[in-house]
Image (cartoon, coloured by chain):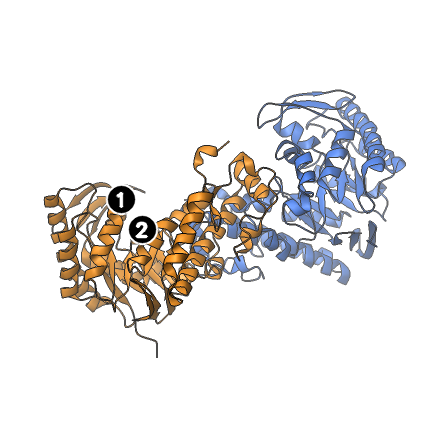
Chain colours: A blue, B orange
Amino acid sequence: MSEPFAFTVKAQDGRARTGAITTPRGVIRTPAFMPVGTGATVKAMFPEDVAATGADVILGNTYHLMLRPGAERIAKLGGLHRFMHWEKPILTDSGGYQVMSLAKLRRITEDGVTFQSHLDGATVHLTPERAIEVQCLLGSDIQMVLDECTPFPATREQAKASLDLSMRWAERSKTAFQKMSVPGQALFGIVQGSVYTDLREESARALIDIGFPGYAVGGLAVGEGQEAMFDMVEVATAVLPVERPRYLMGVGTPEDMLGAIARGIDMFDCVMPTRSGRHGQAFTWAGKLNLRNARYAEDSSPLDPESACPAAQYERAYLHHLMKSGEMLGSMLLTYANVQFYQELMARSREAIAEGCFAQFADDVRRRYREGSETPNGED
Amino acid sequence: MSEPFAFTVKAQDGRARTGAITTPRGVIRTPAFMPVGTGATVKAMFPEDVAATGADVILGNTYHLMLRPGAERIAKLGGLHRFMHWEKPILTDSGGYQVMSLAKLRRITEDGVTFQSHLDGATVHLTPERAIEVQCLLGSDIQMVLDECTPFPATREQAKASLDLSMRWAERSKTAFQKMSVPGQALFGIVQGSVYTDLREESARALIDIGFPGYAVGGLAVGEGQEAMFDMVEVATAVLPVERPRYLMGVGTPEDMLGAIARGIDMFDCVMPTRSGRHGQAFTWAGKLNLRNARYAEDSSPLDPESACPAAQYERAYLHHLMKSGEMLGSMLLTYANVQFYQELMARSREAIAEGCFAQFADDVRRRYREGSETPNGED
């Protein structure tokens, strides 16, 4: 007998909480950060190293996987977990966000969205039902409803119309999920509403009426600024049920995540640790460093003496050399160290919440990042 | 007390031999393949994985390292071993070959070679003495004399003049090495002479007169074809002392190495397993495969079931997807599997020689490669 999908809050500290999501493929400790495995790989990392960082769950991109290698092909090969050598839980998005940001010639109707693949120009039609079908073919443990990620900025009227469509799609997604999913899998709804308090509340209530085992806050980190993002998170988490996990999509920096945890968020995903790593930026307990900076050319100290990551033990001078030389090993090491930093940040957050000192912990990390971080201006 | 540099032949099978080179940093089992770590990294591999493949020694490129990050800088940072996290032996070339193949505006005089860096155009002067100084700054365990890699084709007169210069440089290299090296380090001479039997013999004898603890055969695999290469290897190994290791530089394919081992060669280096891996080609016990080929799109068999390499257990369909998607993990896995295949080929060669069945073993591998290999024509 496999464990059903469940969520337990183990401790609270203010509005911050720590707990665990139980799934048939393993437990996800919250607050949790999900490394992004866009094309069936967390870029530049061996899957066993992703697990070694402490990641309990990764994110897969429905848009990318349905286009290449194709959901039916992955299903034929035994599902996404087997395909990419990752046995722990996988959350997949619905594809909606990437349709908006990557695809060409998008056209949205009540039925769904029609777009041209950014890879080969093929015309693809994505509906709430097809988004669920694809996620079920992949074998995703936590699936997301298809929604329209409301563009920013949007007028109140635009945001309201977009939200209404997303709520109708959420209902269709749930109906499709009930037909196609297998026991233990879960479907999350997504709160939209741009930067409008009343629309965010309306969206959260509409989703609660439909009923989901978890709720995401979407349409943020799209240019609205940290303050507006925090405001919208607060509005959403005030309405969302405390007994369900809350996932802030596409966020973010260490400071963003700490602020969102303080406002009751349990889950995050972001390309930042992986993408930054490939470009020479390192997240460390001393701040964000730019390893391409000439100041590291003869710096024989380890990347991050405070990290337990094997990659963080490499000397800064060596990492500087690898990045300046365009060597793949530089990307491999910095990605590994960054993903581990994000996991360590979650682990320490969980501990701090359990010990009732989260605000102090978050202040300490914010100070380190304010004082220790470099801007890319120092690049040589 | 560290072990001095020494070589022992443990078994012979025809002209093939198996043995061990002892160095202060560890034993090199022969025949040995040295993965190439051009810019202080075996491209796309973690150093611990290079060791896990069974590699006892890697090669570093003096030309690249002296230009970036610089030999003095590496010395300041504790030497090349510490810099690149590789504690086992390192052999460095002299830089001569890359000056010829990569640098701009080369000018060769009796004193040495002046060239412009391919990185920033800086004028650099490399002499036999400076080549040794650089290798000592790097802390290389096995160093190579500076020579002129005779261009191919070359007339007998050109080859003779080039050879004479290389022999004078070999003598100067040895004198410099005696002043600058530390106990346990070794300097190898390099046989030149293009495709001229008498010149190859003359070169080998001249080097023996100078006296080296090991000898390389250089200036081959430059377009002369496999038959001419094998002929020149035979000529050289017939003259070179049996009690010294023999290194065939820049070679080669599995078939090249098996033929050279049969003619008495003990050491190899080549970019082929690493470079091919980054381009989607896999060396397996079933032949050379091109993972970009559409035939692998739904092939759920492991890359190489006969290999013990963790990377060779990944399914071909997944590797195909990664290579078609340009994902770094594809290069990482194929490089790892290829380097391990090369090491397994050496390990099985050593066993076969010890058991007196090397010719049969080599025939079997050649047959697998003739029948099982793909050409890039199948690319989709």
Q: Which mark is residue A375?
A: none
Residue beneath disc 1: B222
The crowd level at tag 2 (other Cα within 10 Å; few <14, some 14-19, many 20+) is many
Tell me the element at label 1.
loop
**Residue at 45% across / 43% down in the picture?**
B371
Q: Judge by depth and name the residue closer to the eye, A116 or B287.
A: B287
Image height of A193 relative to B261, above or below: above
Name the kind of residue labelled 2 in the image.
Gly
Residue A323 shows in the view: no
Image height of A82 relative to B246, above or below: above
Quarter placement of the N terminus of chain A: bottom right
Q: Which mark is residue B250?
A: 2
Q: Judge by depth and name the residue closer to the eye, A329 or B54.
A: B54
Name the kind of residue labelled 1 in the image.
Val
Q: Judge by depth and name the residue closer to the eye, A260 or B349.
A: B349
**Residue at 50% across / 57% down in the picture?**
A303
Residue B209 shows in the view: yes
Pointers 2 and 1 in contact (C-beta within 8 Å): yes
Tell me the element at label 2.
loop
Direction from residue A212 to residue B300 in the image, left or right: left
Direction from residue B154 to residue B314 in the image, left or right: right
